[in-house]
């Protein structure tokens, strides 16, 4: 009974194939390992502020929002964190504002 065997006909093609497979495997492992560490790198702290007479949710959110972020997202966060259901603020209210570091 003759055994069918595999023979490398082109060592260069075999080397390229193994190299590409190794690079893909290393890249995949690196991506999986760094995915959680980048999410954990963002730390959100909160600043306590007191509402003044001319303050609105928009003005407060605009003051504490980075230029690359949307103010409306910060407004939604403010309402959720401080358990606010309407857009009305009272002078003297104490709010917690998220501040990314």
Image (cartoon, helix red, strand yellow):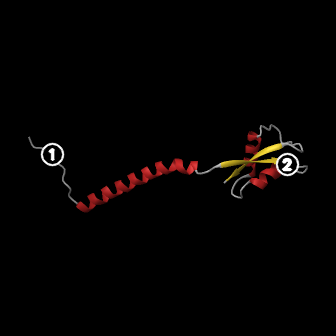
Q: In the rendered image, which residue does mark 1 sit on? A: 4
**Camera-side residue of 82 and 15:** 82
| Residue placed furthest toward the right | 53
In the rendered view, does 71 fall on the left or right side of 37? right
Query: At numbered mark 1, what does the secondary structure look like: helix, strand or loop?
Result: loop
Which quadrant is the N terminus positioned in? top left
Q: Please rate how many residues cluster around mark 2, counting C-alpha atoms within 10 Å: few if below 14, some from 14 to 19, many from 20.
A: some
Q: How many marks?
A: 2
Quarter occupied by residue 92: top right
Quarter occupied by residue 9: bottom left
Instruction: Find residue 62 and report its horizontal and vertical position in percent.
Output: 78, 54
Query: At numbered mark 2, what does the secondary structure look like: helix, strand or loop?
Result: loop
Residue at 33 percent across and 58 percent down: it is 19
Q: In the rendered image, which residue does mark 2 sit on? A: 56
Mark 2 or mark 1: whose residue is earlier in sequence:
1
In the rendered view, does 71 fall on the left or right side of 54? left
């Amino acid at each position: 009974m003759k055994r069918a065997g595999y023979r490398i006909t082109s060592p260069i093609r075999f080397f390229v194939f193994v190299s590409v497979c190794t690079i893909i495997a290393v890249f995949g492992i690196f991506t999986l390992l760094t995915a959680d560490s980048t999410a954990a790198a963002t730390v959100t702290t909160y600043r306590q502020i007191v509402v003044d007479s001319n303050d609105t949710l928009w003005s407060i959110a605009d003051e504490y929002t980075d230029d690359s972020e949307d103010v409306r997202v910060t407004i939604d966060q403010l309402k959720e964190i401080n358990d606010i259901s309407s857009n009305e603020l009272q002078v003297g209210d104490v709010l917690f504002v998220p501040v990314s570091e």
